[in-house]
Image (cartoon, helix red, strand yellow):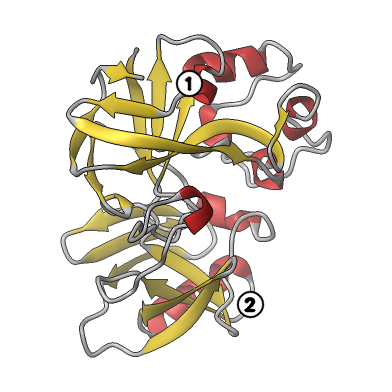
Amino acid sequence: MHVAALYRHPLKSCAPRAEPVLDIEPRGPAGDRRWLAVDADGRFLTAREHPQLVLVQACPTAHGVELAHPRAGALHVATPGADAPRRHVAVWRSEVDAACAGDAARHWISAVVGFDAWLVHMDARATRAVDPAHAAPGDEVSFADGYPLLAIGQASLDALNARLAVPVPMARFRPNIVVAGGGPHAEDGWRHVRIGGVDFEAVKPCTRCVFTTIDPATAMRDPRGEPLRTLATYRRGDGGVVFGMNLIARGTGRIAVGDAVHA
C-alpha cells in the first residue's frame, strides 16, 4: 500500500487542499484545521448547517491565511499576535481558549455564513484534548471533529461508488490521507500503521454524518441523501455509519504522496 493523496483543511469545513507532503505534529498535520468560524456565542460553525463554508478556499501563508469565497471575495488574515483578544469557543463538548482574528476577518466570515460570526485561531496556548476513551493522556487535537487525522482507502471509495447511481469524490469525506493498494475497508482492521517514517495508532472508525451529503463543488445538499443513505445499508458500526479510520500520530515527521503504508 502507498499514499495516493494528502489533504489539509486550514479552516474547519473549508475546501480541501491537496498537498504533496504533510508535516505531522502532535495535533495533526501542520496547518490543518487551525482556524475556526464561530457564532456570537462562541459555538463552532460547520458546513453541516452552513454549507457555504465548503466554498471557502483557505491557503496558509507565512504570516496567516489567505481566504477566498465567491460571495465574500478575498482577504488575507494575519495570525493573531500574543496580545490578541481571546475567547472561549466550543467544539462539540470541548472548550478551547482561542485567539481572535480582527474585525476585517469577522466581517468577511459573517458575509460567508450570512450572520454575525467570528474567526478564531488555534495557537500554542490553545489546547484541546482527544476523547480519553480513545486516546492516551496528553493527546491533543486541532479544531477537527475529534481526532488528529483521518485516513481512507481508495478501494473503500471505489466500492461505495460501485453502489451509487452518481459517483462521489473523495472530498465528500474530508480525509487527510488517501491510501491506495489495499482492499475495500482494509483500514477497518488497522491497529498500528507506519506511513513513511511516522508511526500512527488507528484508534476508531470515523462515524459519518450529513456533511457527506453536501457537494463540495456547489455547496448543495444531495436531495436523495447520498452517499450517506447507501452507506447506511452496509456500513453501520459502533455509533452509526462508519467510513474511514481516525489516526493519532505516535511521533512527528513528514509524510509524502508515494510513501509506503505498512499496517
Query: 104 or 26, which lies in front?
Result: 26
41, above or below 233, in the image: below
Q: Which quarter of the figure is the C terminus placed in?
A: top left
> In the visual, does 191 lie left or right of 29?
right
Query: 24 or 68, which lies in front?
Result: 24
Mark 1 secondary-structure assignment: strand
> In the visual, does 112 lie left or right of 214?
left
The residue identified by callout 1 is: 153
Tell me the amino acid under the disc marked 1.
Answer: Gly
256, above or below 73, in the image: above
**Mark 2 vs 1, N-terminal side:** 2
88, above or below 147, in the image: below
- Could you tell me residue 249's position as x and y percent? 30, 42
The residue identified by callout 2 is: 115
Mark 2 secondary-structure assignment: loop
Q: Residue at x 78, y 25 (%)?
A: 230
Query: 85 or 188, which lies in front?
Result: 188
- Proximity of marks 2 and 1: CB atoms separated by less than 8 Å: no
- Could you tell me residue 253's position as x and y percent? 16, 40
Mark 2 surroundings within 10 Å by alpha-carbon count, few (fewer than 14), some (14 through 19), many (20 or more): few
- Could you tell me residue 261's position as x and y percent? 30, 19
Q: Residue at x 47, y 83 (%)?
A: 88
Mark 1 surroundings within 10 Å by alpha-carbon count, few (fewer than 14), some (14 through 19), many (20 or more): many
Q: CA distance from mark 2 to mark 1?
A: 38 Å
Q: Which quarter of the figure is the N terminus placed in?
A: top left
Q: Residue at x 53, y 53 (%)?
A: 133
Q: Residue at x 40, y 14 (%)?
A: 180
* Residue found farthest to the right: 224
Tell me the amino acid under the disc marked 2.
Answer: Phe
- Could you tell me residue 141's position as x and y percent? 39, 57
Quadrant of residue 19 within the rendered picture: top left
